[in-house]
Image: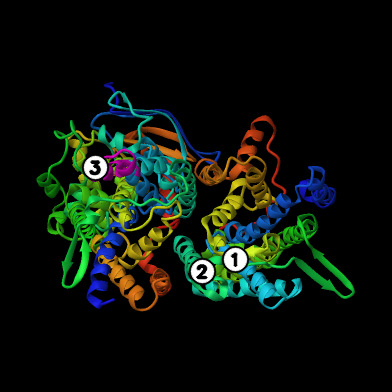
Amino acid sequence: MNLVQQLINGIVLGHGYALIAVGWTVLLGVARLVNFGHGQIYMLAAFVTWWAVAGLGLPYPVAILAAMLAGVLIGLLMQAAMLRLTFAQDLVSIMIVTLGFGHMMRGIAGLVFGGHPQVLETPLSYIDFEIAGAWVTAQDLAVVLVGIAAFALLHFGLERGTLGRTARMVAEDPKLAQLAGIDVKRVYFAVFAFEGAAVALAAAMVAPRTPILTSIGFEEVIVTFVVVVLGGIGSVAGSYAAGLGLGIFTALFGGFVSPAYATTAAFGVLIVVLVLRPSGLAMRAGGR
Amino acid sequence: MSTPILEARELRVTYGGHVALDIPHLALAPGELVGVVGANGAGKSTLVNALLGWSRGAPAVSGSVRLAGEEIGALPPHARVARGLALVPEGGAVFMRLSVAENLAAATPPAGAAGRAHDEAQIEALFPRLRERRHHMASALSGGERQMLAIARALRLGPSALLLDEPSIGLAPRLVTDVLRAVRGLVDQHLSVLLVEQNVRAAIAVVDRLILLERGRILAQGPVAAMRDDPRILEAYLGEAAA
Amino acid sequence: MAGRLAPFLAVPLAILVFLLPGWLGGVHGAFTVIAIMAIAAYGLDIVVSDLGEVSLAHTVFFAAGAYATGLLATRLGANGWLTLAGALAAGTLIALVLGLITLALREFVFSLVTYAATVVAAAVAHNWDVLGGSDGVSGIPTLDLPLGPLRLGATNDVQLWPFAFGLLLLTLYAVRQFRRSRLGAMAMMVHLNPRLATMSGIDVRRVRLGVFVLSAPFSAVAGWLYAYQRAYVGPDLFETYFLVLMLTAVVLVGRRRLLAPLIGTALIIGQERFLSFGGDINAIILGGALVLALAVLPGGLDGLFRRAFARTAQPAPHSDRRPVAQS
């Protein structure tokens, strides 16, 4: 395959990756929380989108909204269960609990949607364009546009204005934020709802590129780690750049070295970064 | 006597079975400045934190807290703040990653408190240093400036009662006088303040009434004129000298 | 009181448990799997409960033991002793490398990197032909352990059960001794107060590395037996099921209780084997148990029983609590 095609694949892939990771960026940046059930929310949301389109015959945009709603509900439920751990900032327990939630979601998906792989057909996947000798679908373009839009909104929302200030206050010192009259519990719920909605949006946009199975989601979590960590915890612009970079890296590595090991290679980079620069993830996890 | 602006009954705080605070009754009259003194670990901070239902740890707090007659003992901290009770915690806690202006703007007065809230001009008149440092990050401030910012932020919330936890800690003696004088000035403008102070001498100079705490219990309380020569207060002085 | 009597109670209890699968009508398979997974969980337990870190890489040590066994037995026709040595070596070596890499990492970052290691290992297992790729290694011969003129071995679950049970007892003994050892005491100090530990002259990094490496053989030896029990190893060993199973077993009953991981494993596998509602609902139950144990019942089932018990009876003095230096 030629370089231009791989680069364009990489850009599309990269926007998908950034979109998948955007929820985690906010989760970690604002609330110092993690969600290892992230991939399973992606998986469930992909199924919900497929079911809304193929089962209910809803138009694709409505299906996206349905998936996002499901994501919000899952996020709120998870946060409700973890509220005590959240206030204690017990990140390690939160991590394990979210792993447990992920396992539950897999069971639920198997129960509701069955074990067969499904393919989500969207009207946009049938429209092709040729750009500089490379082929892209309208779905690919939509992924890029939604990715850019999501990050632009988040950037302006979080870096300026009351919302951003509240977010930074809670991120720095949730207890002190209470003294400024902020309902920290509501912020935590909002952040988890956003995480659910964001990953569901990503699933609805990206999942049409691949078969949907109950076992998907693993790779999405990995991608998210890499993007969030390489981008610098909580940095919106950093996550976007890291997502894009990772997408291009994966496309080029997959195209020219080995497709099977592309994610592994990316993760190898992550391990090296974490080991060399653990302060990149410095957070008040359990410390005072 | 008029209704107390802040009143607590049967206020108890326990940490894992250990009773850290047990206050049968405590009241703060409108426009009154009450000092809470006592040795280290007497429960002074625990008391003001409990009044707001706030803590860095996870204690069990029970009891009734009334603000201007309204029961707030079951509300979460932010809701108590919204009703007009503000706390400046120990050590001039401010948001280090926010600028001075942002720290002040972060505390938007709740609806209904707008009349009481200090506006920016009043804050700057009270603490001129903060105007000069408006655009600095809070992390670049000195200890005294942080303390002023922390108090100013609380005033922006337009509280009807203010809880001040050791505003003098770590400050140079001259600054201690400045800060406490500023507090006295606020009280003279009819704010009610409960002031926790390790520096008994400095506290006696400004407060109307003193409460002496020991091991989480009220050992003695009364008007400052009567308490000044109480041997137990003198003991607290000695504790201060030894510390 | 319990501390003194425990050794005398342990013998009849052990004999009882050993005979139990026969009495229950030949459920040796389930009991063997419980023993194997409990042994694997004990490796994780000493890292989680004693060192205070959550490793997500113990499935790798488990899988390394299983893969080493499968490969040595099928490719080289190695007997049980050789595969055992291979399994222990593989698990320990990987733990040593990973331990060195994560030496400076703590808490969440440590967990993240160990999770990363699991993901990388899973990708390698799926894609590397030497490990059998996604087909895995099948046709593993039955366990044989030639001992001089004796030929010990196991061709079915009934015969495998004594081996699994023996290994489990050995594991329990080893964990108990570890907790009484100097390393165990140092691990607790490092866990509870790393600064004080440093000031007491403890090399925190060495203790962390020591405990981490020491924990791997438990999980690896469990993998060794698992390979013989299933006669097949594959990349499914890296699925979150095993990870969630081990984590749940460790946290479900309570921390730093010798029998807790065993009881936890028995509850989980027991439910899957005897009260199964199908894979999907079992997954919901297992995941739900993990969520409940941490989010709703801090201190696990043990803590729940203690609280319930404390209401009706006088709280018993904790005879099993070792003195730990307080700051």
Q: Which residue is mark 2?
A: C121
Task: Please name the amino acid that badge 1 sits on.
Answer: Ala
Colour scheme used in the picture?
Answer: rainbow
Q: Disc 3 versus disc 2: distance between alpha carbons?
A: 41 Å
Who's the residue at 57% across and 72% down the image?
C131
Q: Which residue is mark 1?
A: C63
Mark 3 crowd level (few <14, some 14–19, many ≥20, 10 Å Cα): few
Q: Position of residue A36 (x, y in %)?
A: 43, 54
Is residue C38 visible to the viewer in this orientation of the structure?
yes
- The circle drawn on residue A74 is none
| Protein chain holding label 3 | A
Q: Position of residue C110 (x, y in %)?
A: 48, 64
- Disc 2 and disc 1 in contact, CB within 8 angstroms: yes
Who's the residue at 19% across and 53% down the image?
A153
Mark 1 crowd level (few <14, some 14–19, many ≥20, 10 Å Cα): many
Pointer 2 and pointer 1 on the same chain: yes
